[in-house]
Each structure stands twice: as C-alpha cells, then as structure tokens.
Image (cartoon, helix red, strand yellow):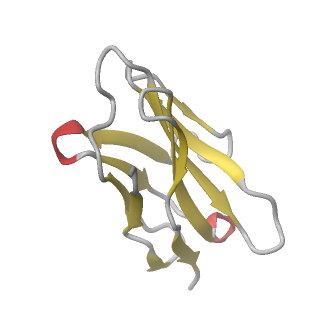
Amino acid sequence: QVQLGESGGGLVQPGGPLRLSCSASVTIFKFPAIDVICWFRQAPGKQRELVATVASCGTTNFADSVKARFTISRDNAKKTVYLQMNSLKPEDTAVYYCYLNSARLGGDYWGQGTQVAVSS
C-alpha cells in the first residue's frame, strides 16, 4: 500500500519561507520507471490547483503564480520530496497536497494535506 504524508505546514508572515515535505511509504523515482510527484493546493472556496511537479528524470514545472518563489527537490534515500516556498503571500494560503502518479506502483495516490496560512 502506497501512502504519502505531508508535513511542514503552519502559519507564516508574508514574505517568509516555509518548507513542506512529502514522504512516501515506498521507494519513488525508481529508474527507469516514470514517477511524477506533484504539489497541489486548495484555498477555501476555490478549486484545487497544480503548484509544482517533479518527475523521475528531474524535470520540474511550476505554476506561473509561484515561479521564482517556490522550488522543488527530492531526497531519494529518504523517499521525500520537498517544496521550498519563499516570499510567501497571503494568496498562498491553502491546504497543500502531495500527489503521486506512478504506473509502476499502480496509479494515483494523494496525501492528506497540510495547511499553510500566510498572515501577519
């Protein structure tokens, strides 16, 4: 059973940083399989939106709203993907979810989410 767990959320002031972690219960990014980890977020009353992705080959993509402020990295040994968020804005407030797409592991998996609140 594949499980994902997010951590690192909390309350931060505008302009501050926060690092989210997504830990998997199994090995991910196992070459040559193609696994993709995505970070989504959902603000109250809004649809869930894609924030960032990282694939097995190392390719990353970011939503325009977070480019140059967010980075994504991974520690394969720890089976963890990180979302480093800098220069946070109130509009970044949302529940952040980790998502894994892996044909090798049998499909799509979601974490339970972690709350990020940006406020003074």
Q: In terms of image quadrants, where is residue 110?
A: bottom right
Q: Residue furthest bottom?
A: 120
User: What's the residue at 44%, 68% (across, down)?
Assistant: 16
The one nearer the camera, 33 or 106, is 106
User: What's the residue at 56%, 77% (across, down)?
Assistant: 117
User: What's the residue at 38%, 24% (across, down)?
Assistant: 56
Q: Is residue 18 visible?
A: no
> Residue 18: image x %, image y %?
40, 65
Q: Is residue 49 left or right of residue 100?
A: right
Above or below, comparing residue 116 to residue 76 in the picture:
below
Q: In terms of image quadrants, where is residue 75?
A: top left
The one nearer the camera, 89 or 47, is 47
Above or below, comparing residue 16 to residue 105 in the picture:
below
User: What's the residue at 49%, 60% (across, down)?
Assistant: 111
Q: Is residue 3 left or right of residue 51?
A: left
Q: Is residue 79 visible?
A: yes
Q: How many marks?
A: 0
> Residue 32: image x %, image y %?
33, 14
Q: Is residue 43 left or right of residue 83?
A: right
Q: Residue furthest top?
A: 32
> Residue 107: image x %, image y %?
54, 37
The one nearer the camera, 117 or 119, is 117
Q: Residue furthest right?
A: 45
> Residue 92: image x %, image y %?
63, 64
The one nearer the camera, 75 or 109, is 109
Q: Quadrant of the C terminus?
A: bottom right
